[in-house]
Amino acid sequence: MTKKRILTGRRTFLLGLGTLAGMGTFTVAGQFKRLNSQSQTITDLGRNFAVAGGASLRDRAANKGLIYGSQGHYKFLSKDPELAALYAQESALLVPGNDLKWKDLRPSPDRFDFTKADWMAEFARTHGMLFRGHTLVWHKGLPSWFKETVNSRNAEQMLLEHIATVAGRYAGKMHSWDVVNEAITLRDGRSDGLRETPWLEFLGPEYIDIAFRAAAEADPQALLVYNDNGLDSDSSKTEKKRAAVLRLLERLKSNGTPIHALGTQAHLGESAIDSKYTGLRKFLSDVADLGLKILVTEMDVIDKSFPTDLVVRDRMVAEVYENYLSAVLDEPAVIAVVTWGLSDRHTWLSKKKPREDNMPVRPLPFDAKLKPKLAHNTMALAFDRAPMRDGQIVLPRQTPFYDIQGHWAQVYIQALAAKNIISGFPDETFRPNASVTRAEFAAIITKAFTPVQQNNKAIAFQDVPQNFWGYNAIQTTSQSGFLAGYPNGTFQPGQQIPRAQVLVSLASGLKLSSDDTSVLSVYQDVAQIPAYATNKVAAATQQKIVVNYPTVKLLSPNRNATRAEVAAFVYQALVNAGKAEPISSPYVV
Ligand code: XIL
């Protein structure tokens, strides 16, 4: 293996060129000139970054009692199923990048629009992710009306109303809130380090305490976080900022202000490549001594001045992740690591810190094609090596479908999916409102009830050849009394199954019947129930198998059943058979 030494002035730079692909460009000295002049180094490029196992960052972190999370945007997650699936796989926590900011929530002074934020909260919930709020108070991300509307007379009222409304809406559903973001900057020259913001101007330094108290009142369960940037590097400027933040935290604590954690953004710059993090470690330990937890809230790596070569660049980014995380995860008060994005497909750094060579930036653990990069490996390694945290984190249960959030049948669908009775599509959707064919229904019944065939003689349906995918399920269900063929000797496997047929099938298979059809009078559309179905539908009604959405009194017996409706009926039938726990729903008849 050829090795090349490049002296950086501070450290020796060992490049395992033989192991690198795309090394042609790499040997061009000019490419490293700038890099070297900034004395950035990367150690041991030839080393093996492989991590054992294919576990997700979510699981990797959770093994140590840590939370790994990522920032995402409604506008991307709601339209990109592939991306959404990656979030669900890798992240235990979701934080909307912008959807909870004033600008996005408040189109006018008297109106809140929670459409995007609610979607994100539901996305997190249905995918078993914690939800994190960013941010209630910030000098940026304000709507255009803010300037002419908010003044010293109404500022406190506006702030309190905002926090009560927004934090109140997600009360009990938020893991944590960035209550105040970026309140410190040394640039404004104040002795307390506070940034000159409208809130400071109108309310004085106490605006921070006011905000935390309001957040605690609106959501007593959320972890309340003070979040800030530029706390990481070894420079003396950063040391001063850390000192100012520590003073603020001390002040808040001694005021009895309900603050629970510090968030450190960790948008790591070029200097991070050889940071020692001595000052950062000391700072984190001081913060922990105040009784505060710590979250890394917005991690990404600015690769603006890293070399063009992708292999080298990815290694440098990966190493920044590893070095940083191994330093901060040594501090037991650090409970979570959140990256500002998950894949290079969407990152704010494309606009904020574009590269001079016009190559796309690569700051995150997954590339734009959603493939894991070395940074993913080094993050996993850092989690593996992190000291075990006290206490286990309990993550919400994961469901694989992202299109059932808020759906009336969501609980039924999730419950059946957890039992492997139903499944979704490869794009991670369930398509709850699509119809169901008789063959598909037979397959669901077979999985739900493992029906016993009464005789072993195959029924020769003329339209179900033996090589048909649903042949076995159709045989099983038709020989066990759940389904029957048509008098003309067909089964009609591709026919969409109407609601009445589903109920008849379930009642027949479970051997339920009723001589008393008076119960059917609960249905306004009782007259539409076909004669063959009355007895069985009556039995199904008595046994609480019927679920009618949106109107409990409307059976709509001849309408094709949707996948959601089949899930609800089958679930109720399982409850009837003693094979599932009852779930309460306002739509059960
Ligand atoms: C950024 C978003 O990522 C961008 O999409 C938006 O245009 C501006 O804000 N620190 C923060 C975040 O606390 O709110 C910022 O997010 C990134 C820096």
Image (cartoon, helix red, strand yellow):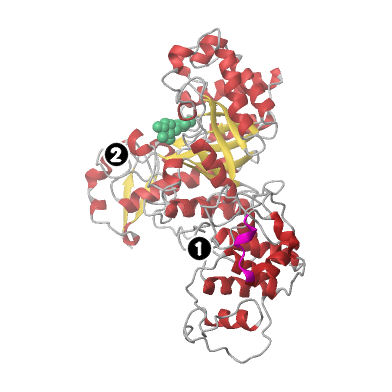
The circle on residue 355 is: 2
Q: Secondary structure at mark 2?
A: loop
Residue 437 makes an appearance in the image: yes
* SS at circle 1: loop
Query: Where is residue 563, by image quadrant?
Result: bottom right
Q: Amino acid at mark 2?
A: Arg
Tell me residue 43's x, y (percent). Answer: 41, 49
- Residue positioned 44% across, 47% down in the render: 319
Q: Residue furthest bottom?
A: 457
- For the question of whether residue 589 can be seen, the reply is no
Mark on residue 471?
none
Q: Split into 4 quadrants, where in the image is the C terminus?
A: bottom right
Q: Residue at x 48, y 35 (%)?
A: 99
Q: Quadrant of residue 384?
A: bottom right
Q: Nearer the viewer, residue 587 or 276?
A: 587
Residue 435, which numbered label?
Answer: 1
Q: Which residues are magenta?
A: 525-531
Residue 196 position (above or below residue 296): above
